[in-house]
Image (spheres, rainbow, N blue to C red):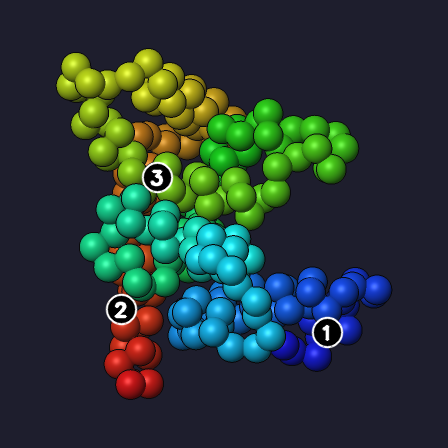
């Protein structure tokens, strides 16, 4: 365990807690398997249930399960988390400013508290908006089918309202098509990150 983590550990912890925490920390590495950890050290494991309860509750497991449920073709690859900040280098200063204003309008109830403690983290909002933009074309396509839900229609209504308010405030002309273009840029960025990860993995092997 890195010295920085050891320094910040809670005092008066039992050896049991330390072993459990160290095992969970080790299991977060994609290079280790849970079997390798559970069969080493002073582990008295009466059952597999205990092993998974003690170790198999880390971020790695959560991400692996989420990848499979989300339909990733290669769930073993790391997830490239999108963010609207990825568009900062792909759009002009003016266009990125329009996107940020749209974000603030669309998430006005999540970002509008005077006490910043009650606002949702900007990182979370940026990731959420990026995901919405990336899947916007699929959402629009679903509205033309009978399977379209009220929730999807409400989402599009809110987006169109935010677009109209942002355009009026800035005196520009943002459209749903503009948002789809931003989503396409984000998909391109994601593919680049995944390709870079694959190349690094190949070179390391």
Instruction: Tell me what residue is drawn at x 21 percent, y 55 percent.
Output: 73
Q: Nearer the viewer, residue 100 or 39?
A: 39
Closest to the observer, 140 or 79: 79
Residue designated by label 1: 6
Give the distance between the C-alpha atoms of the residues marked 1 and 3, in whole angstroms. 41 Å
Dot 1: few (<14), some (14–19), or many (≥20) neighbours within 10 Å? few
Residue 90: image location, x then y, percent: 37, 56
Q: Residue at x 70, y 29 (%)?
A: 113
Question: Hey, which quadrant is residue 200 in on the image?
Answer: bottom left
Q: How many marks?
A: 3
| Sequence-earlier tag: 1 or 3 | 1
Q: Residues within 10 Å of mark 2 (few under 14, many from 20)?
A: few
SS state under label 1: helix
> Which x, y percent locates residue 172?
41, 32
Residue drawn at x 43%, y 74% as measured from the top left = 36
Image quarter where the C terminus lies is bottom left
In the picture of the structure, the residue carrying the numbered disc 3 is 133
Q: Is residue 59 visible?
A: no
Position of residue 176 measured from the top left corner of the image (x, y, whole percent): 30, 30
Q: Nearer the viewer, residue 81 or 39?
A: 39
Up-down relation of residue 160 to residue 116 (above or below): above
Q: Secondary structure at mark 2?
A: helix
Q: Residue furthest right?
A: 12
Q: Which residue is mark 2?
A: 195
Neighbours of disc 3 within 10 Å: few (<14), some (14-19), many (20+): many
Above/below status of 19 relative to 202: above
Of residues 108 and 21, the one nearer the viewer is 21
């Amino acid at each position: 365990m890195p010295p920085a983590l050891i320094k910040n550990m809670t005092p008066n912890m039992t050896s049991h807690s330390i072993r459990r925490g160290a095992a969970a920390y080790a299991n977060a590495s994609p290079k280790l398997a849970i079997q390798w950890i559970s069969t080493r050290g002073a582990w008295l494991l009466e059952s597999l249930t205990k092993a998974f309860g003690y170790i198999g509750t880390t971020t790695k497991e959560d991400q692996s399960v989420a990848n499979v449920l989300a339909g990733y073709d290669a769930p073993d690859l790391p997830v490239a988390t999108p963010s609207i900040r990825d568009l900062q280098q792909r759009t002009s200063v003016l266009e990125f400013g329009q996107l940020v204003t749209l974000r603030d309008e669309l998430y006005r109830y999540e970002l509008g508290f005077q006490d910043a403690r009650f606002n949702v983290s900007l990182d979370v909002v940026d990731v959420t908006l990026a995901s919405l933009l990336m899947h916007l074309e699929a959402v629009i396509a679903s509205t033309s089918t009978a399977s379209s839900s009220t929730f999807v229609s409400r989402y599009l209504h809110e987006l169109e309202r935010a677009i109209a308010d942002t355009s009026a405030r800035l005196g520009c002309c943002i459209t749903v098509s503009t948002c789809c273009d931003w989503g396409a840029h984000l998909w391109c960025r994601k593919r680049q990150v995944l390709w870079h990860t694959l190349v690094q993995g190949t070179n390391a092997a």
